[in-house]
């Protein structure tokens, strides 16, 4: 017989999505169980970069971003066709004017600890295997294999699936992703290099060539500095419409070989083998609530189709989900509670619907055909206003009401795009 534990909310997965949701819920006084299959600290394949939008979410969680372990970035250094340009993060009201990096090894551990300190009941080494449902198909909890090798049922009237790109819980309930949404892949590797790690800019290359074919990568390459004397080096993109799949590891090898020799990004300074993973994008599970289950982060395909960023989006959606759930729990089970829960997808659609719709179209029609190179042509690189506009568009750093002319242009463009249909 399985052990049993009850809560008001069960959260599956303690990545940025799950831990942020659990922390917000616990802070709102909700009894929350946070179930994680791994034991912290653990690695997660990622570029480890946060734009100002992500930093803003850390501040909203009450995390001290001045503590050791964080590396601040002033902006991005863009490389294309032999040219380079430093672009500072915009100094808008409403967002911090800096980005951050931190290895996911540390970041996820810190965030899970933060949720626990706020009052969430964290169970690590606990792998959810099956959703539990009632006769109507509504989720009522989950069964998991626990750290001691036994099984346990964790029951709650509401469950949040934040189990990452595998989206195991949603799939177990027959909830498929929208196959039209973009799905990128990316590879990364750590190298030790103090000089590069001291750089104040996140470096991005729009002109990486695919191994074997020589075509432009339908994505970009990066070198991100970290506070521990290492750099996160990687590349990725959506599959090529014209040229099919790319051998990412071979492409990484060839590209890194072409970077300046004095950077010493070689086998002697590599810390680990290259590792790759999928990036589900474009809001691929909608609406994000059904029958007691809210989906969040990569399990809902929340990675931005513009730039492959998913941590900020996971944490922002987590806050919306937590606010929705805390309010819904003040109502008795039934139609009025369900009405409150429908606010979660409605609010995401309001904030992101148009932005993602446009991004999905651009990913399909531009990035997957010709990559990012045309966006950083000589003409664009020599126009500070255009570069500023593109930077804000790609990092979703726009404000409404508009604070300046660039904001007005972006807001107007986005208003013209229809929202994603549910
Ligand atoms: C190579 C690469 C580079 C990237 N670079 C960046 C970047 O620089 N910046 C950025 O913002 N985003 C980046 N991303 C995207 C980012 O990694 C994801 O969007 C982000 O991790 C999503 O967070 P999440 O919490 O939804 O999922 P995850 O981080 O995947 O967390 C899911 C958690 O659920 C747990 N879990 C899974 N199944 C179960 C189960 N059955 N039971 C219990 N627990 C379970 C997992 O162990 C994990 O801890 C990158 C992705 C890749 C692949």
Image (cartoon, helix red, strand yellow):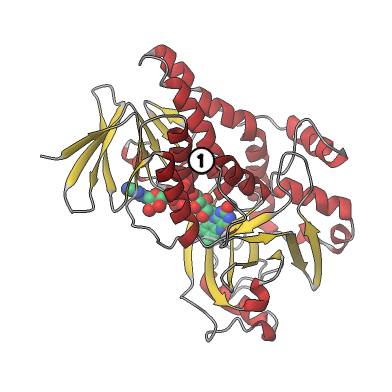
Answer whether residue 237 is visible to the viewer in this image.
no
What's the residue at 85%, 57% (across, down)? 380
Q: How far across and down, in percent of the image, does residue 148 sit?
A: 19, 53
What's the residue at 52%, 62% (across, down)? 103
Q: Compare residues 210 and 319 and report the one nearer the observer.
A: 319
Secondary structure at numbered mark 1: loop
Q: Compare residues 36 and 350 and report the one nearer the observer.
A: 36
Q: Compare residues 289 and 50 and report the one nearer the observer.
A: 50
Q: Quadrant of residue 282?
A: top right
364 is higher (above) or lower (below) than 29: below
Q: How far across and down, in percent of the image, does residue 250 sit?
A: 54, 75
**Residue that label 1 marks:** 284
Left or right, residue 202 beside residue 385: left
Q: Residues within 10 Å of mark 1 (few under 14, many from 20)?
A: many
What's the residue at 66%, 49% (across, down)? 306
Left or right, residue 92 beside residue 214: right
Q: How far across and down, in percent of the image, does residue 42 sit?
A: 40, 61
């Amino acid at each position: 017989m399985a052990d049993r534990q009850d809560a008001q909310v069960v959260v599956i997965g303690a990545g940025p999505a799950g831990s942020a949701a659990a922390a917000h819920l616990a802070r709102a006084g909700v009894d929350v169980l946070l179930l994680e299959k791994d034991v912290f600290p653990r690695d997660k394949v990622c570029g480890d970069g946060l734009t100002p939008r992500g930093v803003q979410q850390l501040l909203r969680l009450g995390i001290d971003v001045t503590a050791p372990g964080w590396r601040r970035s002033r902006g991005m250094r863009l490389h294309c066709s032999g040219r380079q340009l430093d672009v500072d993060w915009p100094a808008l009201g409403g967002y911090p004017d800096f980005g951050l990096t931190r290895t996911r090894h540390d970041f996820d551990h810190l965030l899970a600890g933060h949720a626990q300190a706020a009052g969430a009941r964290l169970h690590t080494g606990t792998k959810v295997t099956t959703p539990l449902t009632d006769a109507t198909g509504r989720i009522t909890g989950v069964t998991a294999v626990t750290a001691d090798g036994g099984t346990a049922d964790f029951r709650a009237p509401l469950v949040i699936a934040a189990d990452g790109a595998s989206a195991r819980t949603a799939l177990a309930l027959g909830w498929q992703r929208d196959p039209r949404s973009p799905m990128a892949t990316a590879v990364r590797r750590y190298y030790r290099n103090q000089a590069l790690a001291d750089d104040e800019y996140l470096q991005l290359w729009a002109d990486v060539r695919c191994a074997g074919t020589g075509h432009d990568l339908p994505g970009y390459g990066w070198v991100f500095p970290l506070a521990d004397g290492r750099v996160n080096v990687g590349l990725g993109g959506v599959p090529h419409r014209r040229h099919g799949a790319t051998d990412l590891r071979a492409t990484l090898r060839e590209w890194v070989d072409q970077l300046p020799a004095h950077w010493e990004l070689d086998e002697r300074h590599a810390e680990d083998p290259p590792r790759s993973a999928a990036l589900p994008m474009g809001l691929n599970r909608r609406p994000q609530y059904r029958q007691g289950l809210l989906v969040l982060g990569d399990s809902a395909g929340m990675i931005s189709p513009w730039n492959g960023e998913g941590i900020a989006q996971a944490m922002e959606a987590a806050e919306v989900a937590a606010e929705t759930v805390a309010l819904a729990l003040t109502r008795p089970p039934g139609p009025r509670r369900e009405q409150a829960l429908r606010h979660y997808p409605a609010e995401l659609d309001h904030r992101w619907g148009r932005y993602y719709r446009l991004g999905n179209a651009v990913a399909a029609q531009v990035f997957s055909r010709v990559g990012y190179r045309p966006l950083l042509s000589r003409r664009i690189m020599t126009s500070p206003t255009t570069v500023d506009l593109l930077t804000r568009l790609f990092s979703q750093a726009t404000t409404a009401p508009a604070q300046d002319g660039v904001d007005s242009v972006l807001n107007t463009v986005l208003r013209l795009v229809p929202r994603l249909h549910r």
